[in-house]
């Protein structure tokens, strides 16, 4: 009986994750458009290499605050903290397999962001700064994840810190 309950719970968790993923991507598409959606899709594809569960959505969902702020203020630059928030979520989710996996996964999201920025014809100087800031944030987040005790809230602190560092990096 316990095995069937556990299997049922896992199935419900996967269904909940998929529903949450669809709602997230729909919101990104409606209010942010293809660039925001693409970064979200890459995030969810990479999260598939972790244990996709409803709890991961609690880490992903707050990134939509950056989308809301971008819409409210007209500041398109808030796409960068949104992307780095998602990169940090992937980093934390995959780092349990090893720090290199976390860094690689977070870099995949950052690469999707930078690809969008190339398609948007960002200047080489802007791309260089965004790339350098993204790399520094990912290295710092990887270091923090590997050194921090595994306590509740630690991943959240790394994720929020990464997004706020990206926001601060907009001043460069």
Image: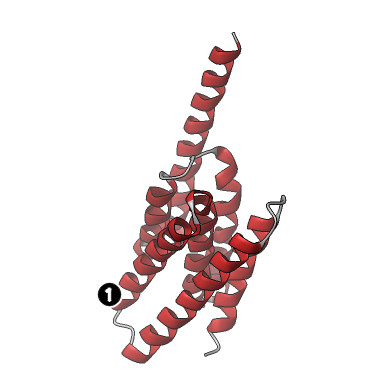
Dividing the picture into quadrants, the one containing residue 55 is top right
Q: Looking at the image, which residue sits at the far top?
A: 1
- In front of the other: 31 or 35: 35
Q: Residue at x 52, y 74 (%)?
A: 78
Dividing the picture into quadrants, the one containing residue 114 is bottom left
Few, some or many residues within 10 Å of mark 1 (<14, 14–19, 20+): few
Label 1 sits on a secondary structure element that is helix
Q: Measuring from the top left, give residue 153's x and y in whole percent.
A: 71, 54
Q: Is residue 54 above or below residue 121?
A: above
Q: Residue at x 55, y 76 (%)?
A: 166
- In front of the other: 168 or 97: 97
- In front of the other: 32 or 129: 129
Q: Is residue 72 above or below residue 101?
A: below
Left or right of 13: which side holds 118?
Answer: left
Q: Is residue 102 above or below residue 138?
A: above
Q: Measuring from the top left, give residue 144's x and y in whole percent.
A: 62, 66
Q: Measuring from the top left, give residue 38's x and y in whole percent.
A: 36, 59
Image quarter in which the N terminus is found: top right
Q: Is residue 147 above or below residue 74?
A: above
Q: Residue at x 42, y 58 (%)?
A: 105
Looking at the picture, the colour scheme in use is secondary structure
Q: How many marks?
A: 1
Residue on which disc 1 sits? 119
Q: Measuring from the top left, give residue 50's x and y in whole percent.
A: 46, 44
């Amino acid at each position: 009986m316990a095995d069937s309950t556990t299997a049922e719970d896992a199935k419900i968790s996967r269904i909940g994750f998929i529903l949450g993923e669809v709602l997230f991507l729909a919101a990104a598409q409606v209010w942010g458009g293809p660039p925001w959606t693409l970064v979200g899709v890459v995030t969810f594809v990479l999260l598939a290499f972790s244990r996709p569960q409803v709890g991961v959505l609690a880490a992903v969902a707050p990134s939509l605050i950056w989308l809301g702020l971008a819409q409210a203020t007209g500041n398109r630059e808030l796409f960068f903290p949104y992307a780095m928030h998602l990169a940090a979520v992937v980093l934390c989710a995959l780092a349990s397999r090893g720090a290199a996996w976390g860094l690689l996964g977070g870099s995949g999201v950052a690469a999707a962001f930078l690809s969008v920025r190339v398609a948007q014809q960002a200047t080489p100087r802007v791309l260089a700064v965004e790339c350098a800031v993204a790399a520094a944030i990912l290295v710092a987040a990887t270091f923090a994840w590997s050194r921090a005790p595994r306590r509740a809230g630690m991943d959240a602190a790394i994720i929020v810190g990464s997004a706020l560092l990206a926001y601060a990096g907009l001043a460069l």
